[in-house]
Amino acid sequence: MVVKDFRVSDMTCVNCAMRLQGLEDDLPGVVEVKASYRTQIMSVKFDINRITESQIIEAVRLLGYTAKPFDSQS
């Protein structure tokens, strides 16, 4: 399992965050999604053998949002 953070700058409210958190039920290999509209960060815990970062980004896009990999060190 890996945990990856994504910047979702078009997440504007609690409902946006809840929609994104619903991905944990919709995507095989995703174990947990934590999203905060205040920080505009979505943290995803997933199995890299079952789903790729690109597939997660595409699923976010299909919900109407833009996700970009986020490195908290930069």
Image: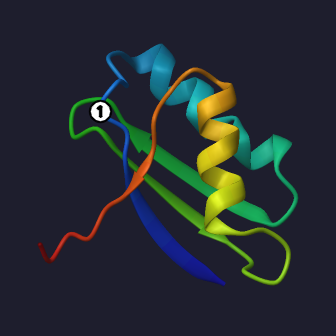
For image coordinates 66% across by 84% down, the residue present is: 1
For image coordinates 37% across by 25% down, the residue present is: 11
Could you tell me the amino acid type at mark 1?
A: Ser
For image coordinates 72% across by 63% down, the residue present is: 31
Quarter occupied by the C terminus: bottom left
Q: Is residue 2 above or below residue 62?
A: below
Q: Is residue 47 left or right of residue 60?
A: right
Crowd band around label 1 with a 10 angstrom C-alpha radius: few (<14), some (14–19), many (20+) = some
Q: For residue 59, which quarter of the picture?
A: top right
Q: Is residue 45 left or right of residue 34?
A: right
Coordinates of residue 51 in the picture (x, y in percent): 78, 68
User: Which residue matches tag 1?
Assistant: 9
Q: Is residue 74 above or below residue 58?
A: below
Q: Is residue 54 left or right of residue 39?
A: right
Coordinates of residue 26 in the picture (x, y in percent): 84, 41
Q: Is residue 19 above or below residue 71?
A: above
Coordinates of residue 15 in the picture (x, y in percent): 49, 15
Q: For residue 29, which quarter of the picture?
A: bottom right
Q: Is residue 73 left or right of residue 42?
A: left
